[in-house]
């Protein structure tokens, strides 16, 4: 079975955490794909250049200058650094952006027309679905024993690069390949009353969200897991990067 793993900016930004994750990831067996972001590093570089990051509902507004920065950070330093760490641990990683070999083709997001953020234009942000994923290319890479390490810089097929949320990319790949989705970050899973829970279903999630027990960045993580399951992924979980290789670790999301 193919496994899709996703790591976020906080893990990437912590050198010891990233090294530990890559060491554990390299020891896994079977076909696997790693999707990563790098938002913490991108925001830091923006600020150093005198550009204040703009986020709307957890999503980065990406104008032309921001697109250049996230492309440099995600497909440059972050992607190559992760591949170097994996290679050092014996994992034959191949780094790529979604635009490489047209692995992922995105559609530019239209300005919001309703809701509290009505009128917001996300700029060079691309939306993707399972249908956006070039399955044969990924399967060919896996058949060669390569481990794709994919960053969320995609293209629209018309010469334009587009920035996509890495969680969305991961769930789209998991759906397209009917692969298990593992979202790795700095906590042990979904916390309820300060303790990780074993599993959460769709109905329970809606209740926890209404109560405010689950909030902030955890909401899109769970929503992406549910979307992957609806798309055909056999399993989806949210877990700590430290527990990679532990089959029952984290919080399993189910429909």
Image (cartoon, rainbow, N blue to C red):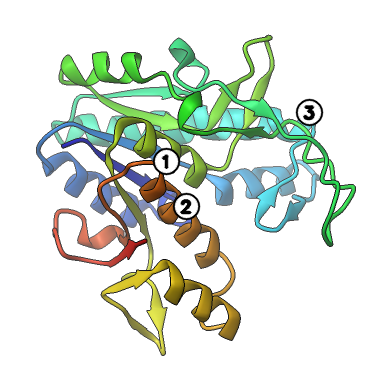
How dense is the environment of label 1, judged by Cα within 10 Å: few (below 14), some, or many (20 and up)? many
Q: Earlier in the sequence, mark 3 or mark 1?
A: 3
Tell me the SS state at disc 1: helix
> At 13% across and 42% down in the image, what residue appears?
28
Q: Are marks 1 and 2 in contact (CB under 8 Å)?
A: yes
| Location of residue 66 (image quadrant) | top right
Is residue 195 found left or right of 47 in the rendered image? left
Q: Spatial distance from mark 3 to mark 1, Cα to Cα? A: 24 Å
Q: Residue 23: x, y in percent? A: 19, 46
- Give the residue at mark 3: 64
Q: Residue at x 21, y 35 (%)?
A: 2
Query: Which of the two marks, 3 or 1, is nearer to us in this view?
Result: 1
Badge number at residue 45: none
Residue 116 in the figure: left or right of residue 35: right
Rendering coords of residue 121 (x, y %):
83, 41
Q: Distance between the residues labelled 1 and 2?
A: 8 Å
In the rendered image, which residue does mark 1 sit on? 170
Distance (Cα) linking label 3 and label 2: 27 Å
Q: Which residue lies furthest to the bottom in this view?
A: 193
Which percent across, then down, holds residue 205?
46, 72
Q: Mark 2 points at which residue?
A: 224
Residue at 59% across / 69% down in the picture?
Answer: 216
Q: Earlier in the sequence, mark 1 or mark 2?
A: 1
């Amino acid at each position: 079975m193919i496994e899709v793993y996703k790591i976020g900016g906080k893990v990437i930004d912590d050198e010891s955490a990233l090294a530990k994750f890559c060491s554990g990831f390299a020891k896994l067996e079977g076909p696997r794909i790693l999707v990563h972001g790098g938002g913490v590093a991108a925001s830091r570089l923006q600020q150093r250049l005198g550009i204040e990051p703009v986020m709307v509902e957890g999503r980065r507004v990406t104008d032309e200058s921001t697109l250049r920065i996230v492309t440099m950070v995600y497909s440059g330093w972050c992607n190559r650094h992760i591949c170097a760490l994996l290679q050092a641990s014996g994992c034959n990683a191949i780094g790529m952006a979604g635009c490489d070999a047209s692995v992922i083709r995105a559609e530019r997001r239209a300005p919001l027309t309703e809701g509290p953020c009505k009128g917001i234009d996300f700029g060079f942000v691309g939306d993707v679905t399972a249908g956006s994923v070039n399955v044969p290319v990924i399967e060919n890479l896996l058949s060669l024993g390569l481990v794709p390490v994919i960053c969320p810089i995609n293209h629209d097929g018309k010469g334009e690069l587009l920035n996509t949320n890495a969680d969305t990319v991961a769930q789209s790949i998991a759906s397209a390949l009917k692969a298990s989705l593992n979202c790795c970050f700095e906590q042990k899973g979904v916390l309820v009353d300060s303790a990780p829970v074993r599993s959460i279903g769709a109905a329970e999630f809606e209740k926890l969200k209404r109560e405010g027990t689950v909030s902030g960045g955890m909401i899109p993580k769970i929503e992406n897991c549910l979307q992957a399951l609806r798309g055909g992924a056999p399993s989806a979980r949210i877990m700590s990067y430290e527990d990679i290789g532990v089959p029952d670790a984290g919080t399993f999301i189910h429909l």
